[in-house]
Image (cartoon, rainbow, N blue to C red):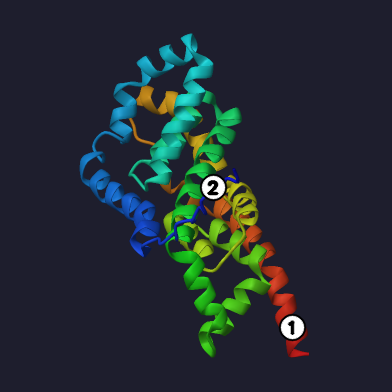
Amino acid sequence: MMMIEPKTQTPKQVQHPLLRRLPIIAILIVAIVGAFTLRDYLSFETLAQNREALLAFRDANYLMTVLVFILAYVLIVGFSLPGATIATLTGGFLFSTFPGVLFNVTGATIGAVIIFLAARWGLGEKLAARMEASEGKVKAIKDGIDENQWSVLFLIRLVPAVPFFVANLIPALVGVPLYRFVFSTFLGIMPGALVYTSVGAGLGEVFARGETPDLGIIFEPHILLPILGLAALAALPMVLKRFKKGA
């Protein structure tokens, strides 16, 4: 007897736009809640009060401390929770300037990727497509970013005035490839992270004097000028392209 196999129908996948936006909505909700509930816990005072316990735990469980620290940093950045600067100081305090800066930059980069992917999945792909199909100034802005992606990515990381959360969103909304985002984030935040990690490495003396660290040190001329020099170097390809087009 001849068997007739029933035809299987693949259900049509219908995905509501809200489902794609759930990750970025979740990040925003956690960020708002965390801003009101965690601000007093993720602070310099908390670090000062628990410094001896943290050092003891690090000495007894170094590898676990590294993993827990990076995970905590990822959560702080990925959900835009308060305390990213304190986390960077803690990395320097626990692990010294090196390898502390590597742990800080790794956690910050992974956390930034979480925001980037959530924004691109929920908003970025459609927005980038609309900008590409548009005309006038919007299309000109999109084309300008596309032609100078590396320069723009490094600029928004190196210029201290650009908020970290904004620097994670902009690339997702204009269709920047993931590998470029990861590479530029890791290297672009390195100078600032190195400054604050070194400050954290010297917190032992600050604690001993009963003082608080100078977090405005990044705006000191001897530190800010080299960072701005790197920003100018990143902007150089855009300037050269502009001159060529003008010629």
Q: Is residue 60 above or below residue 25?
A: above
Give the number of marks. 2
Answer left or right for 237 relative to 59: right
Location of residue 98 in the rendering, given as x and y in whole percent from the top left corner: 60, 29
Dot label at residue 192: 2
Q: Residue at x 64, y 56 (%)?
A: 180
Q: Mark 1 points at which residue?
A: 243
Location of residue 202 in the rendering, given as x and y in whole percent from the top left corner: 48, 29
Q: Is residue 80 above or below residue 64?
A: below
Q: What element carries label 1?
A: helix
Q: Residue at x 36, y 15 (%)?
A: 53
Q: What is the spatial separation of the Cα atoms under label 2 and label 1, in whole angstroms?
A: 31 Å
The disc labelled 2 sits on which kind of residue?
A: Gly
In the image, 18 versus 152, the foreground residue is 18
Q: Which residue is drawn at 58% across and 84% down?
A: 140
Q: Residues within 10 Å of mark 2 (few under 14, many from 20)?
A: some
Q: Residues within 10 Å of mark 1 (few under 14, many from 20)?
A: few
In the image, 24 versus 184, the foreground residue is 24
The disc labelled 1 sits on which kind of residue?
A: Phe
Residue 88 visible somewhere in the drawing: yes
Quarter occupied by the N terminus: top right
Specify the farthest residue to the front. Answer: 1
In the image, 199 versus 146, the foreground residue is 146
